[in-house]
Image (spheres, helix red, strand yellow):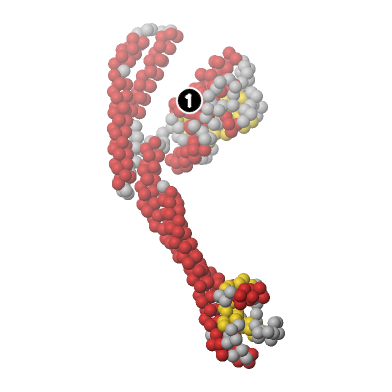
């Protein structure tokens, strides 16, 4: 909007300046021309009294030299020969530049005229002599006298025009700033609200339209906060209602006696009860204004890897795949929720089973660093031809109808901590997916979110 106003002001001011400057420049040029030839006419008229009295060469030399044009060598007097002496006795006093044809025309039609010569123009002024013949006074007008004044006028007009254009652009820019700043604050607040910072609000400032938009945005944000609070309360209430049937189910499971089926039933009931408790705590303690993980938040990578590998090992055994894990012998905490990390690992391991032949070996390694934890999932399959395209959501690079959302899930989990995902060639000969999870999520997460937004605008991610 700001640049649009500047462009409009620039276009309008430029048209106005041209509409006035061009006619003024043309008028100035005509005035300079009229002034130069008017001065030449006065110089020529100064010789008229002398020619009407005498045609003596000495007297005419003094008369020509007394004028400014004559002193500058720009005047000449052409006196025809006396009657009966054709060509003999004709006089030319001063420096002449006019052609004989032009002089003959002026003598034949005694009327002042202007002829073009090298370096400028000449004014030919006819003057009647006492003998009835016509003498011609020639005054040379250099080209510079016709252009010096207009050139200065054009420079002045150009300077004034540029000043007007610059001034109008500056005023339009200041007006645009007054309109753009409230719009940018509104856009920034909308981004913050979209990223989960529900406390984002917009100052009700600026033009009337933007103030109205700010009021509407603030009202919408307040409504979103209320709706999310109601949703959390509803989830907590619904989960709490499950406690009664869970208690009955737990008592009935306890009375089943001993045996594998009874133990599995009791374990399932206990897991279901833990999940319900987790839902209740999450719904009650959720902080909508907080986006990064707080102190103590996250999960143990080693535990999640062991749990998911135990799940996938049965299928790996059925398909004859060799499985190896490393670096999961001690706890390694990362600022990622356990369900999100488990979903990311399931996506990577699912890709191994989906895109490699049966019997292909794979491995999961966990490397604990000072500022980051790296999870490597590698296989001995055919590899990925275009790793960059595989990281683009909706483009897995496979020909089996895969949507490519699995790697996008992994990438979003990594970037939520400020880390990243890279695809390369593994030591097993196939694909290696390197997932970097930064440990200081509160420091790095905002920059990762900004990177994610830039990639979304460029079309590199979903």
**Can residue 408 be seen at all in this image of the molecule?**
yes
> Residue 190: horizontal and vertical position, in percent?
38, 39
Picture layout, residue 2 above or below residue 453: below
> Residue 413: horizontal and vertical position, in percent?
48, 32
Picture layout, residue 119 above or below residue 282: below
> Residue 169: horizontal and vertical position, in percent?
43, 57
* In the image: residue 85, left or right of residue 434: right
* In the image: residue 113, left or right of residue 429: left
Quarter-wise, where is residue 426 in the image? top right
Choose between 123 and 370: the one closer to the eye.
Answer: 123
Q: Residue at x 30, y 30 (%)?
A: 227
Determine which residue is flagged by label 1.
343
**Can residue 66 be seen at all in this image of the molecule?**
no
Looking at the rendered structure, the secondary structure element under dot 1 is helix
> Residue 272: horizontal and vertical position, in percent?
38, 18
Choose between 335 and 455: the one closer to the eye.
Answer: 455
Choose between 404 and 280: the one closer to the eye.
Answer: 404
Picture layout, residue 167 above or below residue 182: below
Q: Residue at x 58, y 87 (%)?
A: 130
């Amino acid at each position: 909007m700001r640049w649009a106003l500047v462009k409009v002001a620039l276009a309008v001011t430029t048209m106005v300046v041209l509409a006035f400057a061009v006619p003024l420049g043309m008028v100035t040029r005509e005035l300079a021309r009229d002034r130069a030839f008017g001065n030449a006419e006065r110089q020529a008229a100064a010789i008229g009294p002398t020619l009407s009295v005498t045609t003596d060469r000495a007297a005419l030399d003094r008369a020509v030299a007394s004028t400014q044009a004559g002193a500058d060598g720009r005047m000449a007097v052409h006196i025809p020969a006396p009657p009966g002496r054709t060509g003999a006795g004709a006089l030319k006093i001063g420096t002449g530049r006019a052609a004989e044809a032009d002089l003959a025309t002026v003598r034949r039609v005694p009327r002042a005229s202007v002829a073009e010569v090298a370096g400028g123009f000449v004014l030919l002024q006819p003057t009647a002599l006492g003998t009835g013949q016509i003498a011609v006074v020639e005054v040379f007008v250099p080209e510079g006298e016709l252009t010096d004044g207009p050139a200065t006028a054009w420079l002045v007009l150009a300077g004034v025009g540029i000043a007007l254009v610059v001034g109008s652009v500056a005023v339009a820019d200041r007006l645009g700033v007054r309109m753009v700043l409230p719009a940018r604050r509104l856009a920034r607040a909308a981004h913050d609200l979209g990223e989960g910072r529900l406390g984002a609000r917009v100052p009700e400032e600026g033009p009337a339209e933007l103030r109205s938009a700010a009021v509407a945005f603030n009202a919408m944000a307040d409504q979103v906060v209320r709706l999310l609070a109601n949703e959390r309360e509803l989830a907590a209430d619904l989960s709490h209602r499950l406690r009664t049937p869970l208690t009955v189910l737990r008592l009935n499971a306890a009375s089943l006696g001993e045996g594998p089926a009874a133990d599995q039933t009791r374990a399932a009931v206990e897991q279901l009860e833990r999940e319900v408790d987790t839902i209740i705590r999450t719904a009650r303690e959720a902080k909508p204004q907080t986006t990064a993980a707080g102190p103590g938040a996250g999960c143990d990578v080693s535990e999640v890897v062991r749990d998911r590998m135990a799940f996938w090992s049965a299928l790996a055994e059925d398909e004859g795949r060799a499985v190896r894990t490393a670096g999961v012998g001690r706890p390694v905490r990362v600022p990622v929720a356990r369900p999100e990390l488990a979903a990311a690992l399931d996506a990577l391991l699912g890709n191994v089973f989906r895109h490699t032949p049966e019997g292909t070996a794979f491995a999961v390694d966990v490397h604990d660093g000072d500022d980051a934890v790296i999870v490597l999932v590698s296989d001995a399959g055919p590899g990925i031809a275009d790793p960059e395209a595989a990281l683009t959501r909706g483009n897995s690079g496979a020909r089996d109808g895969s949507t490519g959302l699995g790697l996008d899930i992994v990438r979003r989990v990594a970037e939520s901590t400020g880390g990243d995902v890279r695809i390369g060639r593994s030591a097993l000969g196939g694909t290696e997916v390197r997932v970097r999870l930064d440990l200081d999520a509160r420091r790095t997460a905002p920059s990762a979110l900004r990177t994610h937004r830039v990639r979304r605008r460029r079309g590199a991610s979903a």
